[in-house]
Image (cartoon, grey):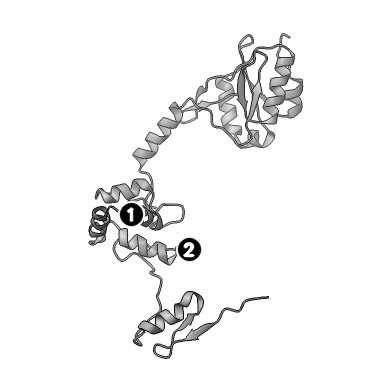
Amino acid sequence: MQTVKTKIQCAKCLNLFSKKGGNYNKHVAKCIGTYAPFAKLSKCKYCDLIFSNEMTSSFRANHSRWCIKNPKRQDYVNLLKNNGNVEAMNNARKKSGMLNQYVKARLENRDIPESPNKGKPGSFLGKNHTYTSKELIRQKALSSKHRRLVRSITKYEKLDGSIVILDSSWEVALAKRLDKQNIEWIRPEPLEWSDENGIIHNYFPDFYLPKFDVYLDPKNPQAIKVQKNKLQILLKQYSNIVILSSLEECIHYTPRGV
């Protein structure tokens, strides 16, 4: 049976209210005839941030309340701190849509550099990383020696009993093939390579055969197509990298000299 939502008109202000949750009764008890329906704010009245249609009324109200340019914001912060209501403060931060680092900056009255993409989709409240912070993040990523994990990881037991993490069925097939031929292999450290602009990157081959000084990297045709320019530069700098472009190649691979 389909439920029909009904609304009742208030005789004083002539607005319609739902019966759900006693909304109508609550309104009638207080109405003096001057009630006006709530209108969504189109922008923050303090920092002029334009609100998109996807932003809820709750988000808009909470952003305005906690906006760094709101003269009453510090009063709200002090009130919550004095009451020791940390949970309420955290909930308010979440509702405002602010990430922790931005909330912390606002609570400490620190300015946050604005992005030229302010208000555009994909930017957080118009705030993006500065060029300096992006460069620091990039340098840290390049210096990282950690291989990114994927969802389809497999724990593989080598002939010596050690356990390694493999990323795909192709890698598992290649590992089995190498073990069958009793060929020693390891998961190598990343290789540094330089792109056409002289920027240094890390490349993570999947296998290294110490006795043959060969790096093996199973890679499907789509990945090869997408990374074509990168691979062309990389293979010029490392001639001992072998790209295996099919499962069949992994199953039947044999290094030269065997």
Q: Residue at x 74, y 13 (%)?
A: 181
Labels 1 and 2: the sequence-earlier one: 2
Q: For the C terminus, which image quadrant?
A: top right
* Front position in the image: 161 or 124: 161
Q: Are marks 1 and 2 in contact (CB under 8 Å)?
A: no
Residue 160 falls in image quadrant? top right
**Front disc: 1 or 2:** 1
Numbered circles on residues, count: 2
Q: Position of residue 130 (x, y in %)?
A: 35, 43
Q: Secondary structure at mark 1?
A: helix
Could you tell me if residue 66 is visible in this image? yes
Q: Secondary structure at mark 2?
A: loop
Q: Position of residue 210 (x, y in %)?
A: 61, 11
Mark 2 neighbour density, 10 Å: few (under 14) some (14–19) many (20 or more): few
Q: Which mark is residue 89?
A: 1
Name the kind of residue labelled 1 in the image. Met
Q: Where 2 falls versus 233 (above or below)?
A: below
Q: Residue at x 62, y 76 (%)?
A: 3
Name the kind of residue labelled 2 in the image. Glu
Q: For the N terminus, which image quadrant?
A: bottom right
Q: Position of residue 208 (x, y in %)?
A: 61, 17
Q: Where 170 falls versus 71 (above or below)?
A: above
Q: Where 204 falls versus 10 (above or below)?
A: above
- In this picture, residue 247 sits left or right of residue 228: right
Q: Which mark is residue 54?
A: 2
Q: Which mark is residue 149?
A: none
Mark 1 neighbour density, 10 Å: few (under 14) some (14–19) many (20 or more): some
Could you tell me if residue 113 is visible in this image? no
- In this picture, residue 74 sits left or right of residue 27: left
Q: Where 178 falls versus 244 (above or below)?
A: above
Q: Position of residue 224 (x, y in %)?
A: 64, 33
